[in-house]
Amino acid sequence: MAPQSDSKPRQQQTQQAQHTEEEEEEEDYMTMNFADDPATGISSSISTSRGPRVGETSLQRHQRLRREAEARARPKSKAELAAEAEARREEALSRSLMAARPQSKGLAMMAKMGFTPGSALGRRSGPGSLSSQKRAEEEGAPSAEPGVTTSSKDDDGGRTGGGGGDGPVTEPLRIAIKDGREGIGLESERKRKLREAAEAAGERAKRARADETEYRERLRREREEARWAGQLAAAQKVAERMAAAAAGDDAGLRDGEGNDVGTTTSLVGETAARPLLKSIPVEWRGLVRAREEAERDRRMRYDLEQGLASRLPTYEDPEEDEDDKRALGKTARTMYVTADDLDEEDPELDEFEALPVDERLRRVVEFLRERHNYCFWCKFAYPDKEMDGCPGMTEEDHD
Amino acid sequence: MADSSKGLKRSSAETEGSQDSKRVKTDGGSNGKMGGDKYNPYLAHLDEGAHNGFKSPLDELERHKTTALQAVKAEDSDTNPWTGRPHSQQYFKILKTRRDLPVHKQRQEFLDQYHQNQILVFVGETGSGKTTQIPQYVLYDELPHLTGKLIACTQPRRVAAMSVAQRVANELDVELGEEVGYSIRFENKTSSKTLLKYMTDGQLLREAMHDHDMTRYGCIILDEAHERTLATDILMALLKEISTRRKDLKIIVMSATLDAQKFQSYFFNAPLLAVPGRTHPVEIFYTPEPERDYVEAAVRTVLQIHASEPEGDILLFLTGEEEIEDACRRISLEVDEMIRESDAGPMSVYPLYGTLPPHQQQRIFDKAPEPFRKGGRPGRKCIVATNIAETSLTIDGIVYVVDPGFSKQKIYNPRTRVESLLVSPISKASAQQRAGRAGRTRPGKCFRLYTEKAFKKELIEQTYPEILRSNLSNTILELKKLGVQDLVHFDFMDPPAPETMMRALEELNYLACLDDDGELTRLGDLASQFPLDPALAVMLISSPEFYCSNEILSITSLLSVPQIWVRPNNARKRADEMKQQFAHPDGDHLTLLNAYHAYKGAEQNGEDMKKWCHEHFLSYRHLSSADNVRAQLKRIMETHEIELISTPFQNKEYYTNIRRALLAGFFMQVAMRESSNSKVYKTVKDDQLVMIHPSTVVTSPYDWVVYNEFVLTTKQYVRTVTNIRPEWLLEIAPIYYDLDTFEKGEIKSALTRVTEKVRRRQAMKGGR
């Protein structure tokens, strides 16, 4: 039998649809009969019976049977088979025998001995039986429903209850099949991750399902967030500038230009101008870090494009003087200090960055007010802590 | 059981010793020391006052009033009180080591408790000597030669029963099978002289079926009760019941783990006596992360230990034969490389699992290899074992234990009727037991290949007792035979799931072993006489109706032993070719029979059977044990007058009859091919999708097969299958194949078609 890749049994690919019932009539191609009964879809055709259906013409029936035969005749892939076998097993494992119809003779015999469905076996009276009675009552309810009782009280490995110890069992032990050689704990770890991923996906799906108003709302929020992000960057720049200005004032030695240290100062000066990342207040540390990283990348690219000399910029020869350095293209401009701290983990910053953008903005604004008596919204540095004249903390206050 | 190892190691020396004693015996007889009156321990009580010159050291002892001192004195005497023969040199040598066992210090305490109580719970860690010593302490107090009531000591495993009996026979300086004997399924090594009997728990249970009150015994010791085997659980329930009727019966429940409280409260708050084992502290290490591949991780850990830890042997726990052999190979290869590259010490790697031939199991007791040169890196041995190394045998010298946390465990679910061995996480108790193996000789280390969190959260406290993991149809039949009326309220220590009992009753009813009222039928009574599963027993009993009881007897025996086919990794193709020589196109049952007939034929031709088996890739051990099983079963058949007949081989119905006879017992294990071009079968009534196990000889895609077992791994297989015809099902098992009880589906419609066909044919015949 030629393997068929198409899974739709309705397509008449198998003229040789061989089956035990030989001498099947030739398909009448002239009739436009699709027998489109949704109940006989592919999934049900596998499991449902072949008994006659109400309101089905003989032709329909004939076609349905043919379709089912085809579905059966199509060789299944290994994965399909495994999945089907597992599904079948799980279904059987989840179905209590107590509910089986016709009633089992075994159950009838046990009933004669005084067994009531839902209870456990074992000695009639005694310390353990009280709790078991209670458990039986709890579990009796679902098992009274036709068909299914759930026996998965515990989804990790399906081991219900503790091994021994607590009351007698009312349900058979679950069968948990382990494939592969994964160590203990890996499965649950993976399950946890999967669950988290599923939750995240659910979240996303929820968002995707947003209707029109939600869409507008989202657009608005996105615009808002973009605006806040711009403001945040601006506020951080202000904070940096003011910090530099303050540093210049405090030191008193350097001129107030602060930022423009340039070639005139020594290498040490360069690093001093950008203090260690961790010492920068977290409110605007991100700004510096992002800039430094961009700068580093740019320089690395630049260095790469330059000749050999500049490719080894960190090599520092104590013999060389200023002029040598300039001659070799090793002036402070191209000489960068490997910013070790750029590669360091910075949990404090990560935490800050994880905050929503408006919250970060609020924190920077507050930082500016407290440290520099500067209101970001008024764009004005007040002389004292009172900040007399500023309408308030938020942007709305300044409308 | 510290001594099982020593016992095994010494076995060669011991045989010499026993020969010695034999010679002494004959000498004694010719000397006429005891005159014409041969000493008879059963008549010892008549020898009041030693009038014939012989004074038994036991004369001073008064039953149930003895002291440790008296017993020690009797043991120290030159004459063996049980045989009347002089003690051998060997005896005193062993006696000295026995006196060093931890349990010896508490002999008096034990006797006091034993005198005061009917039931006693005894806890002794492995190595305390309880299995070998306690029964002897009881022997010197119970004095069974006076009462004629034996002492029984049960063991969960056949091998343990045999080896411990041998050991104790040596310790008592008697012949195995005389004063000390053993009894296991299909093998009984006892005699009328036997006073102390080691036996499997299942064997004692079988005896109880004919002797509901166990009147033969004065004291019953249930050893290794912590293993909670099915038979031990049933025995405990029975003994609990009997103890109220028979106040003279003493019961000792022995356990190796400290969770004895459960036993105590079950046995009317019986007192507890605990003997510490000889153990050293064990340091436990966990992995920081769960492992992706526990075998890989285990191999790595072993190598790491070898590279960096001081002297000491390694014990690695894995789950099964294939995994163990694979790991052994990998470790050996890696160690060779380590030796070449980094001057590591030598290491011998030994596998250990149940189906390994005994002489290979023995190798685990070999000494670790010497360093390559004096003062070089120490050599060590590494044993890769299943959980048989967990409690049942002790290997001295183990300092490092590697525990990936898995073992193969039997599991049964009545909803799908599948009983299978599945790799499952062990329990906390098992993990502790494994760790304890490292502290036998000196402080050790245990490397657990899982995180501490996983240990706490994912491992269950105790391994589930076997009764919760087994098909109970055999047990229920036994209980019925034992006269238990109310199975529902039977006092199980851990009652099984109601559905499991229900399924068992139902199956026994279909097999016609129980009637609709749950009473034992004649067939059921007969089936319970056979030490077989009910389906096998019923098949065997019904086989004369199919004119092939000889052949079914052979097949039954072959199905009762491990696989007879040998398929070594390095000669798979040859093995398969050889198997093909015996192949019968209709199925594996018939192929088994062919192989057996060939075996018997070669035997009659006087061939060297070991060689013959080796050449034909058959297991000599398993075939000869099948032969033995066959003889035992044949005897039972003869006592119950079950005819042994064969269809003449020339008759074309020869094989058909056998195939039909299989169905008489296995009609509940039938599968139908799902569709005409598929390899997938569906089991009848349970609707499980299965494939035929690749080991089969069946090549034609038969529509209907009967199978011997359902194997659940990651796939679902049926193993040992034979082609059958659906008409036979309706004819042989009409009640099970009552189509009204079938759920709608392909199987029902297929069977309906068959019914119609049969009816048509009969109508045609009738019309003529």
Image (spheres, rainbow, N blue to C red):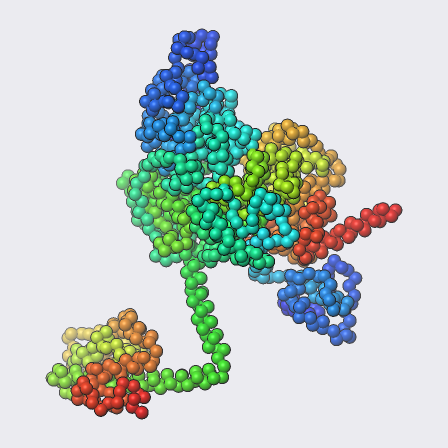
State the count of labels. Answer: 0
Res B635 visible: yes
In the figure, B289 relative to A290: above or below?
Answer: above
**Which is nearer the eye, B740 or B631?**
B740
Residue found farthest to the right = B768
- Residue at 47% over, 32% down: B244
* Residue A266 appears left or right of A84: left
Which residue does the image show at 32% across and 88% down from the upper left?
A396
User: Which corner quadrant holds the C terminus of chain A?
Assistant: bottom left
- The answer to whether residue B581 is visible is no
- Front residue of B119 and B372: B119
Q: Is residue A239 left or right of residue A252?
A: right
**x then y, percent, for residue A146:** 59, 58
- Where A382 sits versus A134, above or below? below
Q: Is residue B591 left or right of residue A58?
A: left
- Quadrant location of the N terminus of chain A in the rendered image: bottom right
**Which residue occupies the foreground of this view, B367 or B20?**
B20
Residue A186: x %, y % from top left: 42, 58
Towards the viewer: A106 or A273: A106
| Residue plotted at (70% across, 49% down) | B738
How far across and down, in percent of the image, does residue A288 sit?
26, 80
Q: Residue at 63% of width from left, 65% of height from top?
A: A43
| Residue A51, position as x, y percentages in the image | 72, 61
